Amino acid sequence: MSREDLAGAQAALVAALVTGAPAPPGFDQDGVRAAAAALLRKRAGEVAAAWPVLAASFGPRWTVTFARWATTRPTRGSLRDGFDLARHLRAGGALGAGALEELATREAQWRYRDGGEARRRRLPAVRRVRGATVAQAFGRVWVRRAKRPRARS
Amino acid sequence: MRGMITDEYGVGIGWRPEIAGFVADLPGLRFVEVVAESLHHPAKHLPEGLRELRGRGVAVVPHGVRLGLGGADPVDPARVRHLAECAAALGSPMVSEHVAFVRAAGVEVGHLLPVPRTRDGLAAMVDNVHRTQAELPVPLALEPVAALFDWPDAELDEADFLTELLDRTGALLLLDIANVYANARNRGGDPLDLLDRLPLERVAYVHVAGGAEHDGRYHDTHTDPVPAEVIDLVAQLCARCRPPALMLERDGHYPPADQLRAELDAIARAAGRPAVTA
């Protein structure tokens, strides 16, 4: 097996694990599927740590919800995975108030467009969502909720 | 860089920010490991908890998880440089990485994947270990991983592959006893068969971690309690060699401090080392 063949074989195995492609010939299909499922559970836990409100808003359905979305999407790191999923859910009207506010907070902190790098904002930013306004300046974040005392996150 | 670890560190633990307070309060501690990729700009900034441990003379070993030594492509020089910077900033006696690949064709797996145990797979890994060692100020220890599947058409068994890898590179062995247990259980073998065939004199330190069964397979999760069978294997290992250090590896779902202390004490008892919790 040349170095190029090895690279190709490794790429085929990776595709089976992170994009849902079938395992390459000769592999134990059940073993590879079990590894892919374990990988999704691990990712779900890591994204939950980075996006606690998003994860908590799905309660016990979080791991399944995340896994369904992530099965065909290789990880881009917990921060960006959470961004992508939260925006996907927001576009479909499937985000609750708390998760919307968390996404707005992240958007005030980070400059991130789909497919790019996530970079910390250096300039102040304001995001408005249903029931709350999120402001960021000098790395600190303030959340103002309608008809509630000012709270800091 | 080649070398042996001659210091006697005893029982340690994986330092994580979530349990930094617990780790700082372990009176007998002399050894911790930190995930190298969790340190950003180590030459300029180290977490306060790690600096305090260094001030107490606790050895801190950077443990890389994203280098991908087993990949077909050459290791990324920037990742190697970062590992070297971690070792320099922490005054580490060694660094460690895995016998694994973690990406291919630009796609990150976010997990440690087994390498094909073929002559060519071995050659690719040896090349990458040499590239890495050339830039490191301290010895490199290599950790075999837990795998839920193996590559087809293996030309070497696990013991022969690892022995030749260590022989050709001079690298040390980071033996994860929970991985030995997981692989033997999932393949239906006896973990002692591997222990009896590995060059145990090259063990730099030992990982001990918990796991759980899921759909008929044992998963090395690092988020569950350490099974009694893994503690028994620590004793079996220490009947065969005297590892310079053994450490508990816990990566999430952190239990109350009493449970962590009990696991550290169980490792110490099985290894015949002093407790670090009192």
Image (cartoon, coloured by chain):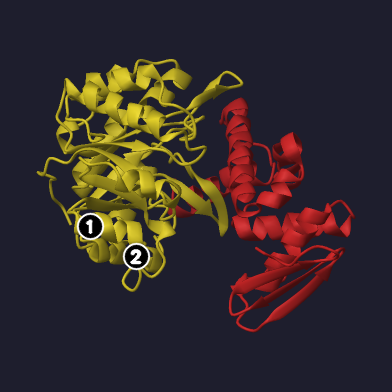
Give, as a three-letter code, the residue at label 1.
Arg
**Mark drawn on residue B54:** 1
Q: CA distance from mark 2 to mark 1?
A: 11 Å
Secondary structure at badge 1 equals helix
Between residue B36 and residue A150, name the one nearer to us: A150
Earlier residue among tags 2 and 1:
2
Q: Is residue B227 above or below residue A9?
A: above
- Would residue B252 be visible to someone looking at this image? yes
Q: Is residue A135 above or below residue B73?
A: below
- The chain assigned the colour red in the figure is A
Q: Chain of mark 1?
A: B
Q: Residue at x 30, y 17 (%)?
A: B232
Give, as a three-letter code, the residue at label 2.
Leu
Between residue B180 and residue B11, name the one nearer to us: B11
Assign the N terminus of chain B to one quadrant of the image.
Answer: bottom left
**Mark drawn on residue B46:** 2
Q: Residue at x 34, y 26 (%)?
A: B262
Assign the C terminus of chain B to one quadrant of the image.
Answer: top left
Q: Is residue B257 above or below residue B132?
A: above
* Location of residue A137 in the rendering, given as x and y in whole percent from the top left corner: 64, 79
* Location of residue B261 in the rendering, given as x and y in whole percent from the top left corner: 34, 31
**Mark drawn on residue B201:** none
Query: In the rendering, what colour is chain B?
Result: yellow
Task: Estimate how packed mark 1 is, as few (under 14), some (14 to 19) or many (20 or more) residues with alpha carbons within 10 Å.
Answer: some
For the residues bearing labels 2 and 1, Cβ distance under 8 angstroms: yes
- Would residue B135 be visible to someone looking at this image? no
**In this picture, residue B173 sits left or right of residue A137:** left
Q: Is residue B211 above or below residue B3?
A: above
* Location of residue B54 in the rendering, given as x and y in whole percent from the top left corner: 23, 57
Q: Chain of mark 2?
A: B
